[in-house]
Amino acid sequence: MSDLPLTGVRVLEIGGGISAAFATRWMAGFGADVVRVDAAAEALGDDQVACLLPGKRRVAANGLHELALAADIVVEDGKPGSLAARGLNPETLRRERPRLVITSISSFGKDGPYAGYESTNLVAHALGGILSLTGSPGRPPLCNGGSQAEYLGGLNGFSASVTAYFGALVHGEGDWIDISLQECAAGMLELHGPMSAATGERSERRANQTSAVWGIYPCADGFGGVCALARQIPALFAMVGDPDLEDERFTDPHKRLEHNDELEARMWVWFSDKTRAELLQLGVEHKVPTGVVYTPKEVLGSSSLQERGFFDAIDTPTGRAQVPGRPFLGFAWRKGALHAACADTEAVRRDWLGENA
C-alpha cells in the first residue's frame, strides 16, 4: 500500500497509556511502522487494546536506545523524567540524531508547578477547566466519559508529531514536543476561557442548553438538539412554526437573550413530540443544524459511518471487534491486525538495526 501517507516512517511508542497509543494508532493506520514497547503489565483494557493496538508491532523493553535512534518519531506518555530514567534522555537522543522527533505527553507537561503531581484523566480534565461547563447549574460538575482528556492528548500528539516530522524532512531538524493534557483540555474551552480572562467573570454551567437556540432537548424517542448561529435563527424559527417567535423579543438578538427562558420553554415543547428521524429531516429541509443523540449500539449501525468506512473489524483472542478506524476520508488507511505482546522483538531489531535473528 504505497499510497499510505506515512509509509516508511518509523515510530517508537513508549509508555503505553491511552495518549501515546492513540497518537500512534493513527500513525499506524496511515502507514507508519509503529513499534510498541510492551510493559510487564498491560496498561490498557481489552477494549482499548482492540481499538488502539492494531497495526503495531510489539517488542520487549530492552535495547531501547538503539531503537530510539533508528526511529523517526518517538512518542511517550510517562511521567516527566521517565524517558531519562530509561537511559533515553530526549536532549541526548536529539544531539545524537538531530532529525529525531520526540513527543512527550503528560498530565501537566515536563516542567512547571504541577509537573510532578499525580494525576488521572479526570484530574487533568478538571484542571483544564472543562468541568466548569459540564452538569446542571447549582450542582456538582459531571465527568465527561471515555477518557477524553487522554484521547485529546493523543490527538494533539499525533498532529504535532507528524507536523514536526515533515518539518524535519524540509530543514533536517526534529524537535522535542511537550504536550500537557491540562493545556489540551483548556484549549477546548472555546470562548469560555478567553471570556473569563478578559472579563474576570467565570462561566457558569448551563446543563444541556447553552442558550435556547443552542442545546439538547428531550424528544419523542430520545434526545435531539440544535446549534443555530445568529444567521440561522430565522430559518430555525420558520422550522418551529410558532408565530409568536416573530415578536421583537425573539428576533432582536439582545432582547432574545433577555427572554431566553421563555424561548427555551417553547423549544422544549416543540422538540417533545418529534422523533429523531423527523428532527433530522426537518433540519435538512430548513437548512438548520439539527442533530440527535444515538446510543453506542446505534452508532455502530450508522449507515453514514459505514458508508465512509469509519469502522474497522479487528480479530481479537475473544472474537471480532468493531472499532473506530479511519478518522476522515482523503488518505488511504490500513486497519492492521493485533500482534501478541513482545512477539516482534527479533523481527524489529532485524528490520531497524540489521541484526541477525
Image (cartoon, rainbow, N blue to C red):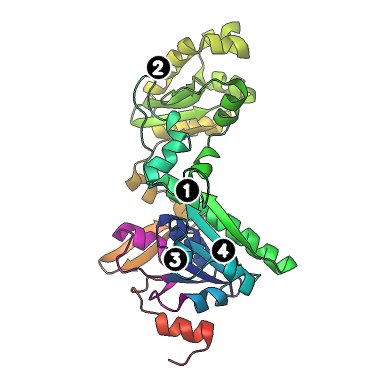
Q: Is residue 198 visible?
A: yes
Q: Residue furthest left?
A: 318
How crowded is the residue under tag 4: few (<14 C-alpha within 10 Å), some, or many (20+)? many
Mark 1: secondary structure: loop
In primary-sequence order, the first of circles 4 and 1 is 4
The question of residue 271 being in magenta is answered with: no
Image spot of residue 302 (x, y percent): 41, 48
Residue 69: give x, y in percent of width and height.
56, 75
In this picture, is 70 found above or below 172?
below
Instruction: First in sequence, mark 4 or 2: give its number.
Output: 4
Secondary structure at badge 2 equals: helix
Q: Residues within 10 Å of mark 3 (few under 14, many from 20)?
A: few
Disc 2 packing (10 Å; few <14; some 14–19; many ≥20): few
- For the residue marked with disc 2, what is the amino acid? Val
Assign the N terminus to one quadrant of the image: bottom right
Tell me the residue at 33%/59% (across/down).
44
Q: What residue lies at 64% left-to-right and 64% top-to-bottom? A: 165
Near mark 1 (Cα within 10 A), the count class, few <14, some 14-19 or many ≥20, is some
What numbered label is drawn on residue 85? 3
Pointer 3 with pointer 1, Cβ within 8 A: no
Tell me whether the residue at label 4 lies in contact with that at label 1, contact meaning CB atoms closer than 8 angstroms: no
Where is the C terminus found, in terms of image quarters?
A: bottom left
Separation of marks 3 and 4 at Cα, in angstroms: 15 Å
Near-viewer residue (75 or 1)? 75
Residue marked by disc 4: 102
From the viewer's perspective, is residue 330 above or below residue 151? below
